[in-house]
Image (cartoon, rainbow, N blue to C red):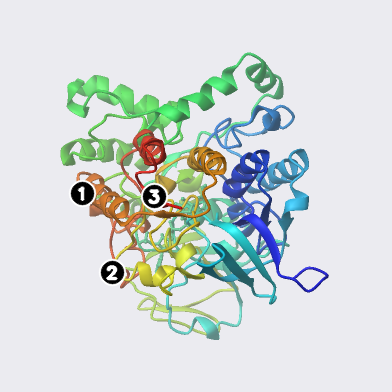
Amino acid sequence: MDEMGKVEHVDILLVGAGFGSFTLLNRVRRLGYSVKIYEKGAASGGIWYWNCYPGARVDSDTPIYQMFDKEIWEDFTFKERYAGGPELRRYFDHLEKKWNLNEHITYNKHVDSAVFDETSKMWLVECSDGSEIYCKWFIPCIGFASRRYTPPIQGLGNFKGDIYHSAVWPQHGVNLKGKRIAQIGTGASGIQIAQEIGDKAKQLTIFQRTPNMCLPMNQRQLDPKEEEEKKKNGTYEREIEKTRHTFAGFTYDFLEKNTFDDSPEEREAFYHKLMVEEGGFKFWLNTYKDMLFDEKANQEAYNFWRKTVLKRITDPEKQRLLAPEQAPHPWGTKRPSLEQHFYETIDKPHVKIIDVNEHPVQEVTEKGIKTDLGEVEYDVIILATGFDSVTGSLAQLNIQGINGGTIADHWKNGTRTSMGIAMPEFPNMFFLYGPQAPTAFSNGPSCTQFQAEFLEKFFKQIQDEKIVRAEATQEYEDDWCKRMHEKWDASLFPRAKSWYQGSNIPGRKVEPLNWAGGMVEYVSSLDKSISNDYEGWKIT
Ligand code: N01
């Protein structure tokens, strides 16, 4: 409500203050739309606000993990090849100032529900503080990881020490020096936390369900002068332009050749270059084109990965647990984390690994954790157990479509979207960086940038044509779901129990959640849906 007691109105309401909403806001306000962002946290950054655990760091490298706008990078230079959480928070402050975003953002504003009013063609959005706002276009930009997952571990509530989840880490930080720490989970968050706190802890026990087949990050400090030069000589622009033409929105892509096109010596040298010399995701996304499709090719990659990692672990039991002879799933079908000194840290005597498949957690007690190996006391339990990924963010909101059903209802027999950006029965609503888009298969800022560019074109076109209602067609949704499955089923991805397909949570439907057909095909599908007289949309 405003001071007159009237419900507020805005053209476009965005939810979440992260990459997605900032990119989109800056584009659509130039078209003359009034735009607001509601953010439930006290500051911007999205995932970087909430996941402020020790060692949080991005796994896309500079310069592509940022806004693709020259005016922004002109006077902000990242200090590291892979930026850490605090630097990314500073980057968001910079964005807010540079683009004067403050007047558009309301913090500590938690959207609870939204309902579409067919008469006014507007969404009525309600917040947990009781306030309401009408918007013509409703666009949640809440990403794929805003609903954390805590497994139902017996007795967790009885623990008298401290429990922290990586996805809602205290903003003021936590002193873990000299503590006896249990950490559950070894995904990207778990790997980063363990390598960061390993040396501070008196004792660290990691409860592992699946080994994370990590790749070396090859982190390095950036030389500010060199970066300035790259900005001047066009390198930044060229690198960013490359992201438009690759499978995952990175600067590199799969090779044209297959694994066994090379001789064993050539292959060995190539793997070494990618994994050891260059680091990052190159061994995953810049490798032979059959690696994620052909079992033998994949095994070859795993053999090299294992051989390389084993050299960094001395304890034979830890070697067995971290890099087993038999891979738990094809290599790369679960997101490999980028580590800095994870294996060396874990190899230390005060760090233990318990495989929960061999020794399940029986119960958390007041003092510690009990398995068939006995009860061990801890001061702190860290839950690095991930998210109700990809769909959980949107499904948790009470958003009602025209037939009164919520998003969760729309997905009760499986996730369905039109091009990973809209759904039938939810007119005038889009979402960024969510289900069935390239999302977790992409460099995040590339995905949000290309989706925002599409929406900018869309909003420009409907403004010119005085269109007030747009709803994805059922036909387009059916077709997208079919294509989603075709791409997914042709790969080795279905073979891993991973959050890519919802199998990290017992009982959840297992289905492809991210578009596996590549960024280029994705963007051209979006464009086609409006260029051809709105063939993907019902328009009025
Ligand atoms: O979550 P995860 P995350 N008992 O789901 C384990 C992005 N991100 O927060 O592998 C024991 O990957 C679970 O085991 P398993 C990035 O895209 C990026 O780490 O399912 N363990 C797994 O080990 C990332 O990939 C960064 O068998 C249990 C862990 O908990 C995504 O977010 C940093 C268990 C969860 O790992 C998710 O990352 C952080 C149980 N009952 C996040 N239940 C960057 O580096 C679950 N687990 C950019």
SS under mark 3? strand
Categorize mark 2 by other alpha carbons within 10 Å: few (<14), some (14-19), many (20+).
few
Q: Tell me the residue at 61%/50% (across/down).
A: 18
Taking the image as shown, residue 486 lies to the left or right of residue 30, namely left
Q: From what the image shows, is residue 44 above or below residue 223?
A: below
Q: Position of residue 300 (x, y in %)?
A: 22, 36
Residue 348, visible in the rendered structure: no
**Which residue is most to the top?**
233
Q: Position of residue 111 (x, y in %)?
A: 61, 68
Q: Amino acid at mark 1?
A: Asp
* Residue matched to label 2: 413
Categorize mark 1 by other alpha carbons within 10 Å: few (<14), some (14-19), many (20+).
some
Q: Tell me the residue at 82%/71% (across/down).
A: 4
**Which residue is most to the right?**
3
Q: Amino acid at mark 3?
A: Trp
Q: CA distance from mark 2 to mark 1?
A: 19 Å
* Residue matched to label 3: 537
Q: Position of residue 186 (x, y in %)?
A: 44, 57
SS under mark 2? loop
Taking the image as shown, residue 416 lies to the left or right of residue 458, namely left
SS under mark 1? helix
Q: Nearer the viewer, mark 3 or mark 2?
A: 3
Q: Position of residue 287 (x, y in %)?
A: 32, 30
Q: Nearer the viewer, residue 493 or 108?
A: 108
Q: Nearer the viewer, residue 271 or 539?
A: 539
Q: Tell me the residue at 40%/64% (across/down).
A: 425
Mark 2 and mark 1 lie on one chain; the one further toward the N terminus is 2
